[in-house]
Image (cartoon, grey):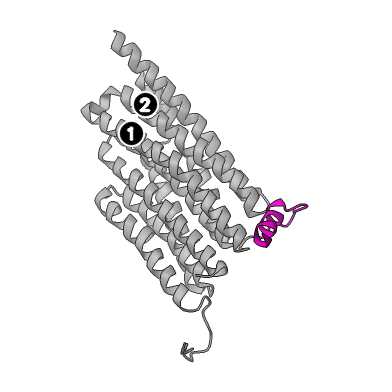
Amino acid sequence: MNSELYLSVVFWVIPIYLTAFALYSVRAVKGPTIPDSVLAIDSMSYDLAAFITILSILFHSPILIAVAMVLALWVFALDIYVAKYLESREMGE
Amino acid sequence: MIELSTLTYLFMAMTGVVSLVATYLAILESNLIKAVVLSAIQSTTYVILFYLLMAPDIALVYIPVSVGLYPAAVLFLIKKTERTENDSNEVVASED
Amino acid sequence: MVEELINEILMAAGTLMIVVGAIADLTGSIGLLRFPNFFVRLHAATVGTIWGAFVPLIGAALFAAGYVELGTHRWFVTGGAAVTALLILLLGPVGSHALARASYRSKAAIPYPLIHDALKEKFREGGKE
């Protein structure tokens, strides 16, 4: 059973994710319009849910996985709030 | 050979810097919707910090309040009032 | 013996899916940073959501199912990752579509390299009749 090999491969995946989060954060902070920022936060949080799952395997602590589900659900709620606000502002109440 | 704790501390530093930048821009922003979105960025980075500091119970309470309920309440309030922040301090009374 | 082989296959498949997801995630973030306007960035964001979040979550579920050192709690990781993957598969496209519809109808994002707008003509025809 050479689980060390697979664990080292998964370990070297972490810097790729960190680079991706840095790029998402740049777009979320400097986004020219409001939907750009919300879209960047949306994508970043969904990828963060995947990254949290991988980290909870690498930390050997399975109880940390419950954050991923809650994060995915509530970021969708943020998305719907902003969409509803944008639509009701121009189209009338 | 890099250890796992080194990458964890690097991730913590990155999220701390991003949350500081987002908070500073949210204070300076005059468009209130953009300020709400920037505070959502700050909430997401704080969730990462709570997770990496091994406090998933606090993260589980912090996510619904600061990502879900707080932008909903503030967006509802902004819809009832004005969209941009005025420099003048006079109260804009809407009689109708 | 057979169980060890099954665990090995599960961990190999999970590692492959996690690596594919990481590369797709980097691609999606570069696209989100470099594309010119909002409606083109939706494409990169969808790549980053489905290929960058759904695929590595399924991979993490398979990896945790085969990783015996986690103990009995590895089934908790497997179930949680599978449920999160299903949620993202359902919620990600719905959120992107709602945001695109709202930002087109409220003109919050202007598609500037635009040659022919068929949706606007459709709205206008629908409004007349």
Residue positioned 38% across, 31% down in the render: C60
Instruction: Say which chain tag 2 marks.
Output: C
> Residue C126, located in which quarter of the rendered image?
bottom right
Residue B1: in sight, yes or no? no
Q: What amino acid type should be assigned to the residue bearing mark 1?
A: Ile
Where A74 sits versus A47, above or below?
below
In the image, is B92 to the left or to the right of A64?
A: right
Q: Under tag 1, what secondary structure?
A: helix
Residue C63 image label: 2
Label pair 2/1, CB-CB below 8 angstroms: yes
Q: Which residue is mark 1?
A: A57
Quick one: C13 or C39, which is closer to the camera? Answer: C39
Residue placed furthest toward the right = C115
Could you classify mark 1 by the number of other residues whose Cα lies within 10 Å: few (under 14), some (14-19), or many (20 or more)?
many
Residue B17 image label: none
Residue placed furthest toward the front = C129
Instruction: Say which chain tag 1 marks.
Output: A
In the rendered view of the protein, which quadrant contains the C terminus of chain C? Answer: bottom right
In the rendered view of the protein, which quadrant contains the N terminus of chain C? Answer: top left
Q: Under tag 2, what secondary structure?
A: helix
- Residue B4 position, x and y percent, is 37, 38
Which stretch is magenta? C110-129
User: Mark 2, mark 1: which one is toward the viewer?
Assistant: 2
In the image, is C7 to the left or to the right of B17?
A: left
Where B20 sits versus A69, above or below?
below
Residue positioned 59% across, 39% down in the render: C27
In the image, is A36 to the left or to the right of B22?
A: right
